[in-house]
Image: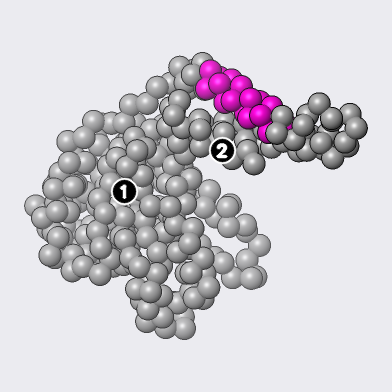
Amino acid sequence: MPRICLLALIGLPGAGKTTLSKWLMQQQPDLLAGWHLLHLCYDDYFDIQPTNKIEYKEQRQFIYNLLEQLIVALQAGKADLPGQVRESATTTGNSNHLIICDDNHYYRSMRYKLYQLSRNQNCLYAQLHLASSLDDALLANEKRGANGALPPAVVQQMGTRLEPPSETLAWEQLTLTLNSTIDFNAVAEEIHNFLQTLLNSPLIVTPAQQEKQPQLQSLTHQLDLKLRARIQNQMKSNKVEEMQQQPELRLRSLALNEQRKQILAQFRFDMRSGQMEFSNDKLEYYVNMLK
């Protein structure tokens, strides 16, 4: 079976993601380390016009489904590709496929969905982050002209929300970060070495969900105990013995317990979605969320 890797591009609008994709597609096989390149640009499928009735999340889900269909077709050795998926003419003879997922991927949750798809389909997952300052992104976006530029407020909002790759998350370890203003020819060797690493990397192996569940339950229980202790300490500082005579203290207790429930729900979500690794020392982060 051929090796397939989903390569998620990360960066602000105007950082050069599509420019990098086109540059890669034009390179000779030696630089690409034996990968057959395919380019899927999300902008080819998004329709954000006011007249469009399809929700943005539904459009993203369509792309995930398309990627899954593409992976299945490649694994089966089929030559027909979905519409608007570009193929490098210089690497068609290679049996290992690198699918460039050309999107901002500014939220980690967007990237995690690709990681999940890779894991479920026995593929590799990797990331290429084009790091840029907000000023550089705004300037590059402005140069696109009226037909291609996003509103500056949208770029600024993405700049505040972009979650760069984490060095502590195991599933984001296969990441190459480049400066968006660099000449790609100047870092061709670095890109080649990264692609070579992907070709030789083992598939990401993660514990089965049923193996994670007991640890999740244990950590959730520990967090719950810590949160309850924090509530008790806060109530003591408010003279909890006078609670019956002071209705505001009862309301405070109810509010703190409601916070506790919300924090536990957020903790479970983060653990299951891979936003944070399983670790006892991470519990204090959630304990400190209780104010």
Q: CA distance from mark 1 to mark 2?
A: 31 Å
Colour mode of the rendering: one colour
Left or right placement of residue 173 versus residue 35 in this view: right
- Secondary structure at badge 1 equals strand
Find residue 83 and report its image quarter: bottom left
Instruction: Note whether 112 is above or below 106 in the view shown.
Output: above
Task: Identify the residue at horizontal 42%, vertical 32% (top origin).
Answer: 277
Q: Which residues are magenta?
A: 217-235
| Amino acid on which the number 1 mark rests in the picture | Gln
The residue that label 1 is drawn on is 127
Res. 154 in view = yes
Instruction: Note whether 177 is above or below 267 in the view shown.
Output: below
Query: Does residue 119 show up magenta in the picture?
Result: no
Left or right placement of residue 16 versus residue 57 in this view: left
Of residue 221 and residue 213, the one placed in the foreground of this image is 221
Which corner quadrant holds the N terminus? top left
In front: mark 1 or mark 2? 2
The residue that label 2 is drawn on is 288
